[in-house]
């Protein structure tokens, strides 16, 4: 019998995707169990979902950390194991036109918050971290400390759009307002950018003329609750292989992209 993987989850809101993952673990369709649920705000109602299932929870209050850092930036103590200059050079969340002081404050506050997350997570030793409606971008400080093997990513996210279209916080809204005829959701591994990591799986749905933004979101969520557990199970079965593809652009330049291959199940 395959051993169960240890799954950690981070949330910011009600945790409907979290519930789908909990249900799949309890039903045995995911060979895993959730060992903790963490949140970035005390208002995250999904923490109560976790508690009802006996799952340990913790909270690192990003809002409070950001507020205190803005009020007294001189009192900000960065994690001793983080080089902010190196992390700023790696990240691609903020464009080159972002004011230097603003960019530094953004990265610094996230490093402080992420150090809190890592400390709270350490005792649970998760094999996989799933972002289930976690509305914070993770910086290279966090990613490099969790993804200790660059060839074996272990942080998954679900996004409410068919990436690479419509990254950001309002995927379904952007899809609907653009007038798309098809919407969908994407599960991907995260990297240093915003919703730019290699794609694991996608599901799509038709947007009818009669659809509203609310009905589009409802269609999308129904697919999210199917897709996310499926992708997690592929991880549990060790079927996800991240490979680098090299190709030639029209102008002759050589480019690369990382893709996820889903291997056939073992017989």
Image (spheres, helix red, strand yellow):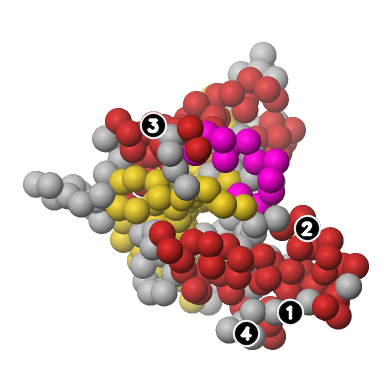
> From this viewpoint, which residue is outermost toward the right?
71
* Residue 266 in the image: above or below residue 22: below
Q: Position of residue 143 (x, y in %)?
A: 52, 69
- What SS does tag 2 mark? helix
* Labelled pair 1, 4 in contact (Cβ < 8 Å): no
Mark 1 and mark 2 lie on one chain; the one further toward the N terminus is: 2
Q: Which mark is residue 64?
A: 2
Disc 1 designates what residue?
Answer: 77
Q: Which residue is mark 3?
A: 23
SS under mark 4: loop
Q: Position of residue 53 (x, y in %)?
A: 43, 35
142 in magenta: no
Tag 4 residue: 80
Q: Earlier in the sequence, mark 4 or mark 2?
A: 2
Q: CA distance from mark 4 to mark 3?
A: 39 Å
Q: Residue 68's x, y, as percent?
A: 83, 65
């Amino acid at each position: 019998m395959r051993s169960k993987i240890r799954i950690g989850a981070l949330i910011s809101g009600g945790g409907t995707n979290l519930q789908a993952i909990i249900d799949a673990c309890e039903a045995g369709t995911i060979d895993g169990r959730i060992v903790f649920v963490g949140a970035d705000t005390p208002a995250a109602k999904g923490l109560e979902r976790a508690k009802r299932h006996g799952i340990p929870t913790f909270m690192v209050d990003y809002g409070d950390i950001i507020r205190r850092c803005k009020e007294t930036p001189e009192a900000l103590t960065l994690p001793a194991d983080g080089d902010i200059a190196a992390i700023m050079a790696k990240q691609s969340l903020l464009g080159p036109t972002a004011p230097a002081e603003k960019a530094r404050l953004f990265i610094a506050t996230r490093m402080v918050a992420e150090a809190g997350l890592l400390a709270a997570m350490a005792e649970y030793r998760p094999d996989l971290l799933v972002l289930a409606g976690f509305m914070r971008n993770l910086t290279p400080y966090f990613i490099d400390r969790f993804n200790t093997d660059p060839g074996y990513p272990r942080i998954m996210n679900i996004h409410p759009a068919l990436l690479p279209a419509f990254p950001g916080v309002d995927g379904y809204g952007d899809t609907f307002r653009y007038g798309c005829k098809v919407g969908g959701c994407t599960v991907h591994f995260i990297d240093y950018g915003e919703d730019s990591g290699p794609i694991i799986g996608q599901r799509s749905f038709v947007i009818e003329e009669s659809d509203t933004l609310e009905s589009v979101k409802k269609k999308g969520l129904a697919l999210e609750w199917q897709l996310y557990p499926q992708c997690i199970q592929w991880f549990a079965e060790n079927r996800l292989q991240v490979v680098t593809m090299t190709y030639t652009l029209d102008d002759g330049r050589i480019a690369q992209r990382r893709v996820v291959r889903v291997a056939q199940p073992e017989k």
